[in-house]
Image (tube, rainbow, N blue to C red):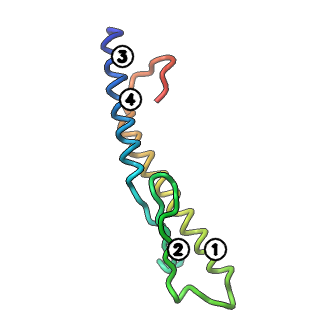
């Protein structure tokens, strides 16, 4: 394969990768726990954007249950965003040539 052509293709793919990374920053993902009693929304930058707790989930005699649901909903949201991000990036990087010294 022509080296110039390969470099142009790599530059094009690198630009597509940068665009996908910027798009991921704008995404949100909602994780839930307790049958939806706790909802946590995270951004593509892996920051918690919102936490919603149903009043039904608040039991003053069992704060550990609420803590567990918040943790579970947060972990669910982070896992979901990580999977969504990986899927988006894989779509761009699929078929990229393996060029020594270049990382994507």
**Do residues under tags 4 and 2 come within 8 Å of each other at their CB atoms?**
no
Point out residue 24 in the picture as x, y percentages from the top left corner. 40, 48
Give the label, 2 or 3, closer to the camera.
Answer: 3
Rendered residue at 48%/73% (across/down): 39
**Disc with the residue nearer the chain's start (4 vs 2):** 4
**Residue at mark 3:** 7
**Do residues under tags 1 and 2 come within 8 Å of each other at their CB atoms?**
yes
**Residue at mark 4:** 14
**Disc with the residue nearer the chain's start (2 vs 3):** 3
3D distance between C-alphas at marks 4 and 2: 38 Å
Q: Secondary structure at mark 2?
A: strand
**Disc with the residue nearer the chain's start (1 vs 3):** 3
**Residue at mark 1:** 68
Quadrant location, the N terminus: top left
**Disc with the residue nearer the chain's start (1 vs 2):** 2
**Residue at mark 2:** 33
């Amino acid at each position: 394969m022509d080296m110039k052509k390969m470099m142009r293709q790599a530059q094009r793919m690198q630009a597509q990768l940068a665009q996908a990374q910027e798009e991921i920053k704008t995404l949100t993902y909602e994780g839930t726990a307790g049958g939806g009693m706790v909802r946590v929304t995270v951004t593509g930058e892996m920051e918690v954007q919102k936490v919603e707790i149903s009043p039904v989930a608040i039991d003053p005699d069992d704060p550990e249950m609420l803590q567990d649901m918040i943790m579970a909903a947060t972990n669910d949201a982070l896992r979901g965003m990580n999977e969504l991000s990986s899927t988006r990036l894989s779509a761009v990087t699929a078929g990229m040539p393996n060029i020594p010294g270049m990382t994507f």
